[in-house]
Image: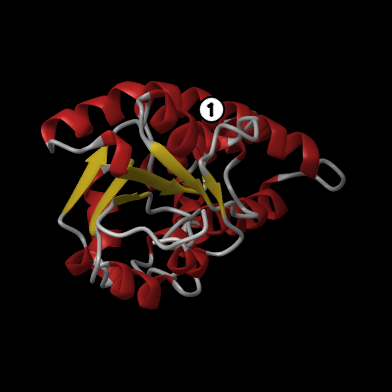
């Protein structure tokens, strides 16, 4: 792409695209495994937790409360007994990096969005628990840049098709921008949109999926590189 595009619709993922998210889960997991696992058994405990988490996400969706449930179930399986009130209090303490209601913006996001909003229509599309995602949007201080914010339980091809129809978007001028191949890039492209892939080193393993060179219309190393193209 040799010149900057004008008048596009840019749809932004939120978690791990606009602000840090999975690294907070990783901090919680590190603290939890250090507490629960027997010496030398950390990898097995982490694998056990990953399996429990995948099951609970499929059954209950995303968010810190579903994650709390996964931690509790993992503890019970490792210790071979029901969780106690003391265990529940400790889990609440371990979860503080996720529940302290602070948002850590990714470098360059605030300035880049402010510039892009001057010449493009910006939308936000994020998945997860509605109340939890809403407070992150509010705490981020970014909401005023977006025409609308959409919180959905899952981001799949049907989600992008519905959004395109409901908002009357021109698919040829609409770009999904995110870090997740599984939720941001592949389903958007399958729905006929363009996509910008901005990888994040801490992208959740459940969001990984192989991308072919043709799957992302544009690949960038940093968020602020969007200004070279839009």
95 and 10: which is toward the camera: 10
Give the quadrant of residue 59.
top left
Determine whether, in the image, residue 195 is placed left or right of residue 94.
left
Residue displayed at 57% across by 33% down: 206
How many numbered discs, if any? 1
In the orientation shown, which residue stands out farthest toward the bottom? 111
70 and 59: which is toward the camera: 59
Residue displayed at 13% across by 36% down: 168
122 and 152: which is toward the camera: 122
Mark 1 burial class by Cα count in 10 Å: few <14, some 14-19, many 20+ = some
Give the quadrant of residue 43.
top right
Q: Is residue 82 visible?
A: no
Q: Which colour assignment does the render follow?
A: secondary structure
Compared with 143, 25 (above or below) is above
Where residue 217 appears, as percent x and y from the top left, is: 51, 41
Residue displayed at 68% across by 49% down: 33
Determine whether, in the image, residue 218 is placed left or right of residue 62.
right
Q: Is residue 153 visible?
A: yes
Where residue 112 appears, as percent x and y from the top left, is: 39, 72
Where residue 4 appears, as percent x and y from the top left, is: 41, 63
Residue displayed at 21% across by 44% down: 150
Which quarter of the rendering shows the C terminus? bottom left
Identify the residue position indicated by label 1 in the image: 54
Compared with 33, 114 (above or below) is below
Where residue 197 appears, as percent x and y from the top left, is: 53, 47
Determine whether, in the image, residue 79 is placed left or right of residue 113.
right
Determine whether, in the image, residue 143 is placed left or right of residue 179.
left
108 and 52: which is toward the camera: 108
Q: Secondary structure at mark 1?
A: helix
In the orientation shown, which residue stands out farthest toward the right? 40
């Amino acid at each position: 792409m040799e010149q900057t595009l004008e008048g596009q619709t840019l749809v932004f993922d939120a978690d791990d695209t606009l602000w840090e998210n999975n690294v907070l889960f990783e901090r919680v997991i590190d603290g939890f495994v250090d507490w629960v696992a027997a010496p030398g058994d950390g990898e097995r405990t982490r694998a056990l937790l990953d399996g429990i988490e995948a099951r609970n996400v499929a059954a209950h969706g995303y968010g810190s409360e579903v994650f709390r449930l996964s931690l509790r179930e993992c503890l019970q399986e490792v210790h071979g007994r029901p969780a106690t009130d003391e265990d529940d209090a400790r889990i609440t303490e371990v979860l503080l990096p996720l529940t302290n209601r602070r948002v850590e913006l990714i470098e360059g996001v605030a300035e880049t969005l402010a510039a892009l909003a001057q010449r493009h229509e910006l939308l936000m599309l994020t998945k997860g628990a509605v109340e939890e995602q809403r407070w992150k949007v509010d705490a981020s201080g970014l909401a005023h840049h977006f025409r609308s914010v959409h919180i959905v339980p899952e981001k799949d091809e049907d989600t992008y098709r519905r959004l395109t129809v409901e908002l009357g978007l021109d698919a040829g001028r609409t770009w999904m921008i995110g870090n997740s191949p599984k939720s941001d890039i592949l389903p958007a492209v399958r729905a006929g949109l363009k996509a910008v892939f901005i990888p994040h080193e801490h992208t959740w393993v459940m969001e990984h999926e192989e991308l072919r060179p043709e799957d992302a219309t544009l690949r960038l190393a940093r968020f602020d590189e969007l200004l070279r193209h839009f």
